[in-house]
Image (cartoon, grey):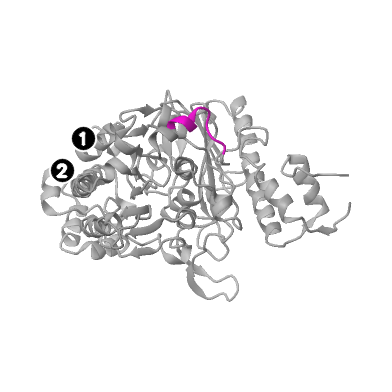
């Protein structure tokens, strides 16, 4: 066949995109618009089409911070009460432990290597060699949740604490209003109350108000974990008297933006010397922040009840990632262990339908978008025909409406910092499947590498939920490793194929060799001689 290049018709490319899955083309297509068995009648009974939607993101909230998710402290009574009225996914996992990439996975139902958004870094511009912030936007071909809902007639509002949820990444796409003021939970709730009044107000002309989507986000729980004094007094003990206590005292008088800005320059300045005592102290500070956020959510939820939003809307509460307190040797969220990937995911249906249901099968944040669009009866291909409508997540409608466990399938998460000109060179992939978790480092831990990193790790989460016993150390020839490597290889092939097909849809060309490979892998339907 040689190296000749071919252009593919748009219809063929879109058909190929509808075939791709992370498991196999013969499996049910996650997020493809197919209705879960039996879901249609229940959706009709609830009349979920054109319902208002409230999506709340508590940045950096690990699942076990909440009593309803296994936490040992009663820091979240408001969220626990919300859980009792919601369908709770006990093992929801973020697709990355980084804010920008995790939220973009949430908003596109695409894995991080697919949408290619990473947190902002400072590095060299690959073209000029000059130092500059490195930021990439989500590809235009991928529709965001806000874009889809806006095209379907929704009024769309995003209230965020900014940071990595910035405009340059493409987060405002589809929002009529989008804010990025780093102001903390109290100010964010105040803005939320104002917008609730606007969104729920009757039209002046007496006509029918459009449905609406409100995205609400706060960094309040995020480091440096400094809450108002009365919360610190309640939740932080006197046992620790090390240097970090003075750092916290110095930061405390600052406003939220000032405290956030002091995180790297002050709070983490001496982190190389932090140990178990600091970890315990930080966890108490963190719990205080969860409780402070919980108290302010009480105000937001009360306003939603007064305006009838809880009775009318679909309300989703989640976090983009968790937080590590040196459980695996690091701070914050740059690894793929459970304390960083297992996050709250609670969905309250109108009227509290199926409230208290708990789903134990692992699910992913990329499942939120296809679930929501199916409930709202919104079809991407109809409202945005020029966008790619292939989502990588799976609809959870059966779990939501019928309290049915979804089908188990591999769930992928990544840490990826390997852009050209960037200061880091890191790509790790975690695969959750059948109660096991496999972590592979794509760049380090190979023969001859002196970094000390392990190329593979394997954990039995049922027997070892804290991931203390790496099964690879016990048996490097464990046959399960080969199976997970096959899943990893398939994942990488899917990402590569999707990127190739996206380029073709934009008018690009493909070599005969790549065409043959795509056909052999089952990505293309029409593969004549």
Residue at horizontal 52 percent and vertical 30 percent from the top:
473
Q: Residue tagged by mark 2?
A: 235
Give the SS element for disc 1. Answer: loop
Work out whether residue 35 or residue 221 is closer to the camera in this orientation and state it. 35
Q: Position of residue 137 (x, y in %)?
A: 52, 63
Q: Which mark is residue 150?
A: none
Query: On the picture, is 436 further left or further right than 305?
Result: right
Residue indicated by mark 1: 73
| 320 drawn magenta | no
Query: Whole-percent x and y of residue 128?
Result: 58, 76
Residue 36 magenta: yes
As drawn, which residue projects farthest toward the front? Answer: 206
In this picture, residue 334 sits left or right of residue 224 = right
In this view of the protein, can residue 325 be seen by the observer?
no
10 Å neighbourhood of mark 1: few (<14), some, or many (≥20)?
few
Identify the residue shown where x is 36% and y is 45%.
Answer: 319
**Relative to 233, is 314 on the left or the right?**
right
Closer to us: 509 or 195: 195
- Relative to 170, does residue 89 appear above or below in the rendering? above
Is residue 92 shown to the viewer in this render?
yes
Sequence-wise, the earlier of marks 2 and 1 is 1
* Magenta-tinted stretch: 34-42
Structural crowding at the residue carrying mark 2, measured as other residues with C-alpha within 10 Å and reported as few (<14), some (14–19) or many (≥20): some
Q: Position of residue 151 (x, y in %)?
A: 49, 57
Mark 2 and mark 1 in contact? Answer it, CB < 8 Å.
yes
Q: Nearer the viewer, residue 488 or 398?
A: 398
Disc 2 secondary structure class: helix
Question: Which quadrant does the C terminus fall into?
Answer: top right
Q: How many angstroms separate mark 2 from mark 1 (CA)?
A: 10 Å
């Amino acid at each position: 066949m040689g190296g000749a290049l071919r252009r593919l018709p748009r219809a063929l490319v879109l058909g190929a995109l509808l075939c791709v899955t992370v498991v196999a083309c013969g499996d049910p297509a996650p997020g493809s618009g197919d209705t879960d068995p039996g879901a249609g009648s229940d959706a009709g009974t609830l009349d979920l089409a054109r319902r208002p939607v409230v999506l709340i993101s508590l940045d950096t909230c690990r699942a076990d911070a909440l009593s309803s998710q296994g936490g040992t402290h009663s820091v979240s009574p408001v969220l626990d009460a919300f859980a009792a009225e919601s369908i709770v996914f006990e093992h929801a996992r973020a697709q990355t432990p980084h804010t920008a990439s995790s939220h973009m996975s949430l908003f596109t139902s695409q894995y991080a290597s697919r949408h290619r958004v990473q947190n902002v870094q400072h590095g060299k511009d690959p073209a000029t060699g000059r130092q500059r912030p490195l930021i990439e936007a989500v590809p235009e071909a991928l529709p965001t949740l806000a874009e889809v809902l806006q095209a379907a007639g929704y009024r769309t509002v995003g209230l965020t604490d900014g940071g990595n949820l910035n405009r340059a990444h493409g987060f405002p796409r589809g929002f009529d209003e989008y804010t990025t003021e780093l102001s903390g939970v109290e100010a964010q709730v105040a803005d939320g109350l104002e917008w609730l009044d606007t969104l729920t107000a009757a039209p002046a002309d007496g006509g029918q108000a459009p449905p609406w989507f409100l995205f609400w986000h706060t960094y309040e729980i995020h480091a440096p974990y400094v809450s108002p004094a009365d919360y610190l007094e309640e939740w932080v003990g006197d046992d620790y008297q090390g240097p970090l206590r003075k750092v916290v005292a110095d930061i405390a008088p600052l406003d939220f933006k000032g405290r956030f800005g002091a995180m790297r320059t002050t709070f983490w300045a001496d982190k190389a010397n932090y140990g178990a005592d600091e970890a315990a102290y930080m966890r108490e500070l963190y719990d205080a922040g969860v409780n402070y956020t919980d108290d302010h959510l009480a105000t937001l939820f009360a306003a939603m009840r007064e305006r009838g939003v809880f009775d009318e809307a679909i309300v989703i509460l989640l976090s983009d990632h968790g937080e590590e307190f040196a459980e695996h040797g690091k701070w914050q969220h740059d690894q793929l262990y459970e304390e960083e990937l297992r996050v709250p995911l609670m969905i309250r249906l109108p009227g509290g339908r199926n409230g208290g249901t708990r789903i134990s099968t692992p699910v992913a944040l990329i499942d939120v978008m296809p679930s929501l669009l199916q409930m709202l009866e919104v079809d991407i291909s109809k409202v945005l025909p020029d966008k790619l409508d292939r989502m990588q997540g799976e609809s959870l409608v059966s779990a939501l409406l019928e309290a049915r466990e979804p089908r188990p399938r591999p769930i992928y998460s990544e840490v990826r910092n390997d852009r050209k000109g960037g200061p880091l060179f890191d790509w790790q992939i975690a695969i959750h499947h059948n109660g096991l978790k496999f972590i592979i480092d794509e760049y380090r831990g190979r023969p001859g590498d002196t970094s000390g990193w392990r190329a593979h790790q394997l954990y039995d989460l049922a027997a070892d939920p804290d991931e203390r016993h790496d099964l690879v150390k016990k048996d490097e020839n464990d046959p399960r490793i080969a199976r997970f490597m096959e899943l990893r290889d398939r994942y990488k092939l899917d990402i590569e194929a999707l990127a190739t097909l996206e380029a073709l849809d934009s008018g690009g060309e493909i070599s005969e060799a790549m065409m043959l490979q795509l056909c052999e892998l089952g990505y293309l339907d029409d593969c004549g001689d």
